[in-house]
Amino acid sequence: MFKFLFDRDTWQEVFDSFSKNKLRSILTMVGVWWGILLLIGLLGSARGLENSFNRLFGSFATNSVFVWGQSTSKPFKGFQEGRQVSLSLTDAKKVEENVEGIEFLVPRNQNQASVVRNFLSGNFGINGDYPLLDQVQKKKLIHGRFINQNDIDDNKKVVVISEDAYKQLFEKDEMPIGEYIEINKINFKVIGMFENGNVNMGPTSDMHIPFTTFQQIYNQGDQIGWMMITGKPEYDIKQIEEDAKLLLKNLNKIHPKDKRAFGSFNLGKEFDKVTGFLIGMQFLTWFVGIATLIAGVFAIGNILLITVKERTKEIGVRRALGATPFEIKRQIVVEAVFLTIVAGLFGIITGGWILIGLDAAFGQGDDATIVNASVSIGVVFIALVILVILGTLIGLIPAFKATSVKPIEALREE
Amino acid sequence: MLKIHQLHKSYAIGDSSLHVLKGIDLNVEEGEMVAIMGSSGSGKSTLLNIIGMLDEADSGEYILDELPIKNLTEKKAAVYRNKFLGFIFQSFNLINYKTALENVALPLYYQGLKRKERQEKALFHLGKVGLADWAKHLPKELSGGQKQRVAIARALAANPKLLLADEPTGALDTKTSYDIMAFIQQLNDEGKTILMVTHEEDIANMCKRIVRLRDGVIMEDKKVNQVRAEQYV
């Protein structure tokens, strides 16, 4: 059989029978070409969307939850409802120590402040942060460094600013590191500048100063604005959220069933939704692509069936000259597989062009909706294997049809 | 070389069946040139098809070159056809998208010969029918007589024991017919056994023996003085 596949005559026969009717062969291939084109185009676009979502979430540890205090909705232990709840560093420490599965816990504070530098000024969100923040929400630093433990220990007046803030406060091409800016009339030294992320989870974060410095200048004492909790990969972030909240209610004398006392935003849950959507879209893509492909392959089978009818006489002659039914079948199956593969390859190439086009149209820049639309070579390979299998199966129908006619009947047909 | 004994064949037509061959006895020796004659419906083509293993008899014996031909699988029939028989058809039955040379080489392809060997043999046989210069031409570029000569070359290519011709001159004008017959006679002179179906008396008289069929039985089986075709060419 392998010798047969590498035999020049086999292919001579295939090419002869195609060159005999080019138009028909091309029309035959359109179906499969279209199917593969759709499959590649859709899969690539789906991947592009997925990439763009991943880029949005990219700077965050996605199994995270943010928790902050609100006001109670139930009276409890002598307290009336409507009591303002605020979190404290002690709370944060207790949560970190007692809730199972926490990787990091980052207490944070935030305030709005007007910032002045020379004659330029703006209103920015000022965050009091620990170095650990960099683990949970990766900052892409363009210049300098993020806050470190030294800054915390010594309550240093240093600040890490965003690119946006830099643009408002500095001249173009000016080096911000080492310069001073005035936050609430207090001078801070700029030690780092980071790239703006694609999305801001939580309050705007234009500037970061050491947590301890923040406590000092705003006279915050033990209070914190909110905490970011990141779970270990093997733990369910929703469970961690529940456990943490229950513990916090306990610590703050809040009714265990009070739903309003603590607000939270579970990034893991949101991320799961998007992931679920992406998986659904991929499934749909495969479904549509393969269904179209099958339709295309059936079109090939259909045309080959007509071809076989047209070639009844030729097949009769071949059999009179000594072609065995197996040889006839083999020839027709090879023709079917060859047609599907050629059409499939064309589909893959043109599908690739479409992805290149999509990339050029929608894939450029930071806010691109489709990022790096592509199809892995494995998928292409699988598609080709499916094509070969389908082509063989569909080729068998006309092949058996061709040999079901007795040679004498085939010859008699004028 | 060919022995047929009490051969029967009927075809089902709707509910009834048509008894086409009603006990045929026929012996053909090597080197003979036999014409099978009869009006249409006499069963002459059916007989030729059974001899050509394109069709199968219902009952009776058929022995070709000591080999009983019975209950053949399609595959075996194909191998025997390829090895023992050469076919010449009324409508030539050349494959229209293949050149003359490729058409002649086709039975050799099914014999499993190597490409080079096939081409050489096919060219040799094309030369024998005087069409070596037309090797690269497609059938549509050839005249009727040339097409039939390509078909004869194809029938000869596999060096068969028996040549079967179904109205070989049926689609040709008289002059070309004689031309082809002269060629077939020449093949017979070289020792090929030839069996042909025809309904033309003049063509039949160019054979050495005439078998007349009517309604599925042999009416007459006689040797004739062969009329040479060359004299008309």
Image (cartoon, coloured by chain):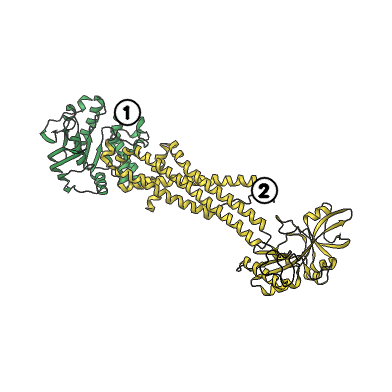
Chain colours: A yellow, B green
Residue A292 lies left or right of residue B10; in this view the side is right
Residue A305 lies left or right of residue A356; in this view the side is left
Q: Which residue is mark 2?
A: A364
Q: CA distance from mark 1 to mark 2?
A: 66 Å
At which x and y percent is residue B108?
31, 44
A396 vs A108, nearest the viewer: A108
Residue A317 figure quarter: top left
At which x and y percent is residue A17?
39, 40
Q: Amino acid at mark 2?
A: Gln
Q: Which chain letter matches label 1?
A: B
Image point 24% across, 42% down: which residue?
B54
Instruction: Let me know if residue B192 appears in the view.
Output: no
Is residue A340 shown above or below A80? above
Q: Amino acid at mark 1?
A: Ser
Q: Which chain letter matches label 2?
A: A
How packed is label 2: few (under 14 Cα within 10 Å), some, or many (20 or more)?
A: some
At which x and y percent is residue B1?
15, 43
A172 vs B200, nearest the viewer: A172
Quadrant (top left, top right, bottom left, bottom right) of the C terminus of chain A: top left
Image point 36% across, 30% down: which residue?
B141
Q: Which residue is mark 1?
A: B143
Secondary structure beneath disc 1? loop
Image point 51% across, 48% down: which residue?
A288
Is residue B41 shown above or below A270? above
